[in-house]
Image (tube, grey):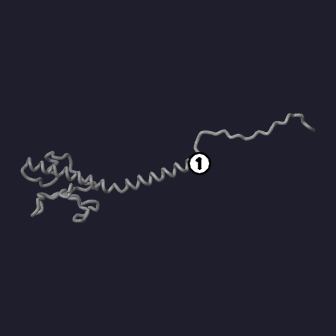
Amino acid sequence: MTTNAPKLAPQHSRRVPRPGFSLIELTLVVAIMGVLIAVVTYNIVGKGAQAEKKATEASLVTLRNAIDSYRVTHKAYPTAIADLVATKEINSSPRDAWKRDFFYSNQGRPGTDQAYLLSSYGPDGTPGTEDDISVWDVNK
C-alpha cells in the first residue's frame, strides 16, 4: 500500500551557536592558573623563614628599648625579663618566632659596649650556633 502523505524535504542540521567556552579554552585557562599558582607558591614559601627572623628581630628591638627604659628609671639593668613585666615596661614576657623564650643576662661581654646579652637561639633552638640572633646584630 502506498501512502499519499506528502514527502518532507530533508532538513539540514544547523547548529545554533550557544554562549560558553570550548574545552580547549577551559584547558588553557586551567593551565595558566596552574603556572600562576606555582610562581606565587615559590615566592611565598621561601619567605617564611625570613619573616620569622624579621619578627624575632623586631621583638628583640622592642625588648632592648624596654631594657633601656628600665635602666633610666631604676639606674640599673633588670635582672630578668620578668622584671620588665613586673614594672610594666612590657605587657607580657615575649617569645621569639619559634615560640621560645629569649635569652637575657644583665652581665654583658667584658671589653665590649654590650652591657647585657639579649638573643634568640634561632630556628634550631641551640645556643652558640650560626642561626642565633643577637640584639646587638640587629640593624647592622
- In percent of width and height, residue 23 lies at 59, 48
Q: Residue at x 12, y 59 (%)?
A: 114
- In percent of width and height, residue 139 lies at 21, 54
Q: Which residue is mark 1?
A: 23
Q: Give the quarter of the figure containing the N terminus.
A: top right
Kind of residue at badge 1 = Leu
As drawn, the residue found furthest toward the left would be 75
When the figure is inspected, residue 131 is found, relative to residue 8, above or below; the finding is: below
Q: Give the quarter of the figure containing the C terminus.
A: bottom left
Side (left or right) of 90 relative to 110: right
* Secondary-structure class at tag 1: helix
When the figure is inspected, residue 138 is found, relative to residue 5, above or below; the finding is: below
Side (left or right) of 136 relative to 4: left
Among the 4 quarters of the image, the one containing residue 126? bottom left
- In percent of width and height, residue 130 lies at 25, 64
Q: Residues within 10 Å of mark 1 (few under 14, many from 20)?
A: few
Q: Residue at x 40, y 56 (%)?
A: 42
